[in-house]
Image (cartoon, rainbow, N blue to C red):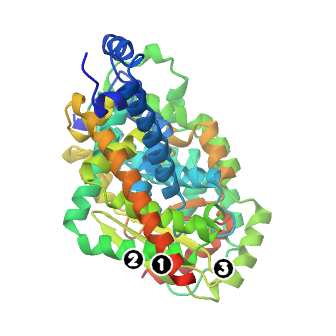
Amino acid sequence: MQHPDEGTIHTWLDGELSAEDAAAFEAHTVNCAQCAAAIAEARGLIAGSSRIVSALDSVPAGVIPMTRPSRRAWYTTTQARAAAALMVVAGTSLVVTRSGARDSDKVMPVNAQSASITSPMITEHVASPIPESTPVRRPAAAPALSAKKGVASSPRIPESVRRADVPLSDVAPSSAAQKNRTMMQTPALSGKVAGVAVATGAAVKTADRNENSESGGSLKVVRSDSSSGRRQTVFETRFGVRVSLTELDPPGFQAAARPSASARALAVPQRPAMISIPPTVTNESALSDMKASIANSIIWSDPATGRSYILVGPLSTVQLEALKPLVVRTTR
Amino acid sequence: MHRSSKPFNTAGNRLSDVERLFRTYNSQLVRYLTRRLGDRDWAEEVAQETFVRALRQETITNERAWLFAVATNLVRDEARKDARRRRHLSLLAEEERNTVVEPETNTLEGAQETALARKAIDALAERDRLALLMREEGLGYSEIAEALELSPGSVGTTLSRARKRLVESYEELQRDRDEREKNAAS
């Protein structure tokens, strides 16, 4: 065998040579001083380049708090942000898909109800009007919230939720049935979502206070980027905290999901975009990730435009809620 | 019946597939993109967009290679489309690099190492750089070949060249810096 070239040496060191080639390689190099030196050099290059690449990792980002960005925080923040985006996308396309799957006029109302039952947090956001000019004081939120909770515990269970009792084997193995299975997973976790994300009465009071301190200030727009169907804006509060707002156009996602004409007609009513909690966040670890994360997110949609908003920042959900009116005003 | 009602990849439903993809690969992908772009916000945006694309994709055979290829292409397309925005973002990133103090680089040396590493990485040819960054995320040769549309046999050569050049240019930058510091001190 000839002396192996550098590419082969790296391939061997990376464990990517086939068993046969590796055997031939080893048979030669075990007695070849020249190759031993080349292997040692390649090992050094591999270790050296790994170290250099790792040195790239201390890159800051706008929304990470400057006080304690740990490695763990870095990942959870990333995941929380992406999960939030996926949640909206997935939730929206889920509704569209279901609308398409069942060509019935009753589809949208059923979805609307199931959304209000499975996710009181989001329903509250959707239900509360976006303030026009002055920040809306929060006290109204507590009764509104408990009212929604009342809805959640009411015996009027919509069809889509009741269907969760149907054994999987009884569901026709069509794609529509598969989507229904997706929906079935939702109620199970909705309690947890509510537990994590819905502000309690006490917390709402805190939000009220926080809002007083925040709403008097102003937000600085650090940067704003638009791409098809979405806009991301990074704000800085007067306390130097950076939050990121992502605005999503529902039509973009509907186009992406290519609903049938009838589904499209159903999906663009006067109602705001329905955001049901998809299985993306049904999982325990996802929730604890988002909870433990130093960055939190809140999601709402504007009933007037149907646009969805994701606000992410190194604040509690209550604080983000308090910041929401200011963000909305600044965005306009 | 429209396109998205078809099952994604396997018999399972698309959402849970994408959820699994996200859990498995998001951190790798974001780190790869951050290293590639030097901007974590941008990296996260691109990663999100990649998973959104996965949601719309009918079938994905080699998941990790697919995700890295899509992310890489998104970066490339975006860079081509809007070079100005890219410059703006790198300026912003540069600005922040100078103002934000992170634990990992809270020493002057740490910050200097990062700057040198960035310069050395930027000096590589694009394909070499991407192959190396993908390998550092644990991608196998076949995955790298698929993501970068290389022949599987050339990945070893690409990586050996990338590593050699990276280390060489890093050491050269280090020498230059030491030289300058010596001159400044004397």
> Judging from the image, what secondary structure is the residue with disc 1 in?
helix
- Residue at the spot of label 3: A137
Which chain is home to disc 1? B
Density class for disc 3 (Cα within 10 Å; few <14, some 14-19, many ≥20) is some
Residue A105 visible, this angle: no
Spatial distance from mark 3 to mark 2, Cα to Cα? 39 Å
Disc 3: host chain? A
Question: Which residue type carries mark 1?
Answer: Glu
User: Is residue B26 depicted above or below A269 in this figure?
Assistant: above
Q: On the image, which quarter does residue A319 sit in? A: bottom right
* Residue displayed at 50% across by 45% down: B27
Image quarter in which the N terminus of chain A is found:
top left
Depth order, front residue of B67/A273: B67
Q: Residues within 10 Å of mark 1 (few under 14, many from 20)?
A: few
Write down the chain letter for disc 2: B
Q: Residue furthest right?
A: A202
Task: Residue type at mark 3: give it.
Answer: Arg
Q: Where does the image place residue A315, in percent across and percent down from the top left?
A: 66, 66
Q: Position of residue A230 (x, y in %)?
A: 34, 64
Q: Which residue is mark 2?
A: B91
Q: Is residue A25 above or below residue A230?
A: above
Mark 2: amino acid? Leu
- Could you tell whether A20 is left or right of B153 in the image? right
Mark 1 — residue?
B95
Inter-mark Cα distance, 3 to 1: 37 Å
Tag 1 and tag 2, C-beta contact below 8 Å: yes
